[in-house]
Image: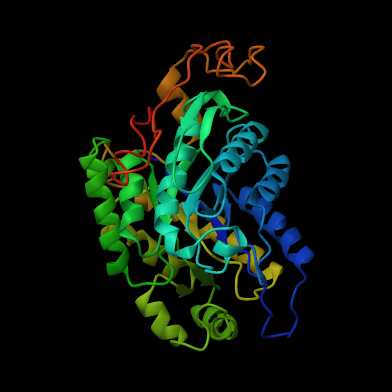
Amino acid sequence: MSQMQFGIFTVSDITRDPTTGETPSEGQRIKDAVAIAKQVEDVGLDVFAIGEHHNPPFFSSSPTTTLAYIGAQTARIILSTATTLITTNDPVKVAEDYAMLQHLTGGRVDLVMGRGNTGPVYPWFGQDIRQGLPLAIENYALLHQLWRDDVVDWEGKFRTALQGFTSTPRPLDGVPPFVWHGSIRTPEIAEQAAYYGDGFFANNIFWPKEHYQRLIALYRQRFAHYGHGTPQQAIVGLGGQAFMAKNSQDAVTQFRPYFDNAPVYGHGPSLEEFSELTPLTVGSPQQVIDRYAAMRDYYGDYQRQLFLVDHAGLPLKTVLEQIELLGTEVVPVLRKELAENRPAEVPDAPTHAARVRAIYGDGPAREARPTSAGGNNMTVGGPYQDTPAVAVKSGQSVSGSAFGAAATRKEAVR
């Protein structure tokens, strides 16, 4: 059976429960996120992903800290970000933090790169929102190189130049975390994902299917253009949203007050209108199965399906019940249905183990062992015993073509 990944993503909002009037504390929501992730593993789902925000009413300002803590209490699930802000985070720190998280979790880490949806975050971190797209392009070009070259010489527009720099620790087994590029509206991000042969994650919770069909089709076509494979071999992830009860009308009754007062879409279209226009499905488990089994009719065979279930003030008990329904009644059926008639060329969802095998086969993977260079890569030689004592000079500039000059070599594996 072809392997798809199913899981939960959280935007980490802290919202008043409209049925009780109570607002959980930041501390409570942080603890709840841990409980949610553990439930994801307990019911047999594959992925827990958490967003990044730096302002109330959100709590997730440090995804790596949260995911490391969760990683110590789980054994199997992939720990991902729902968004890593590639625009306002320093690529050097991203490279180091997530490589460290890789080591701590045995490779159970990947990332969704994005620009976020909170405009004021840019000046808080010394950046200009008007440069959001160029920042996303340049910063990821540097991050991509930092994870692949032991010694980096680099110069760009938005940060200090690097000379003879080594990001530590090196990625686990010499294989960087898998990267998805997330977007809800920007074709340039789909192009960026295609250029590098990375995954493309479509949020898929706010817009009609035609909107995401265009973005995903562009990504698939450009993925093939850059020589990474056929359009069907591109790596696609989708968001989704559901609320379930055994009886569909009970689900509607229970969810309506949360929908009507949700921070993002409350006081706008009705629940029925929003459900018709977007993948939000409020009803029985079978209705969710029917809705999401049809996703490949719109987007093609894909690799990852994540659901948003813990937002808008829903209490933890309810959220855990929703995850239980997904894990026991919905996802087992979706795994089977989405595997039927799946073409052999469609790749499985990416995992660290599979990507290591693609490089090393049955041989030993890399274990980076430093030399005595002491960080002086300019004159003393290479920083690691198993690499040449020369600085790799790929991708020194991001001038000219947004992608062609950003990195001069293709990734060995996705």
Q: Name the spot of residue 116 as percent of width and height, x first.
A: 50, 62
> Splitting the image into 4 quarters, where does residue 124 fall?
bottom right
Could you tell me which residue is drawn at 66 percent across and 72 percent down?
A: 57
Quadrant for the N terminus, please.
Answer: top left
Quadrant for the C terminus, please.
Answer: top left
**Is residue 116 depicted above or below 232 in this figure?**
below
**Position of residue 52 in the picture relative to residue 300 (left or right):** right
**Is residue 287 depicted above or below 369 in this figure?**
below
Residue 45 visible in the snapshot: no
Q: Nearer the viewer, residue 394 or 252?
A: 394
Q: Name the spot of residue 394 as percent of width and height, x first.
A: 39, 28
Q: Nearer the viewer, residue 31 or 169?
A: 169
**Position of residue 205 in the picture relative to residue 247 (left or right):** left
**Position of residue 98 in the picture relative to residue 194 (left or right):** right
**Is residue 51 depicted above or below 336 in this figure?**
below
> Splitting the image into 4 quarters, where does residue 226 fall?
top left
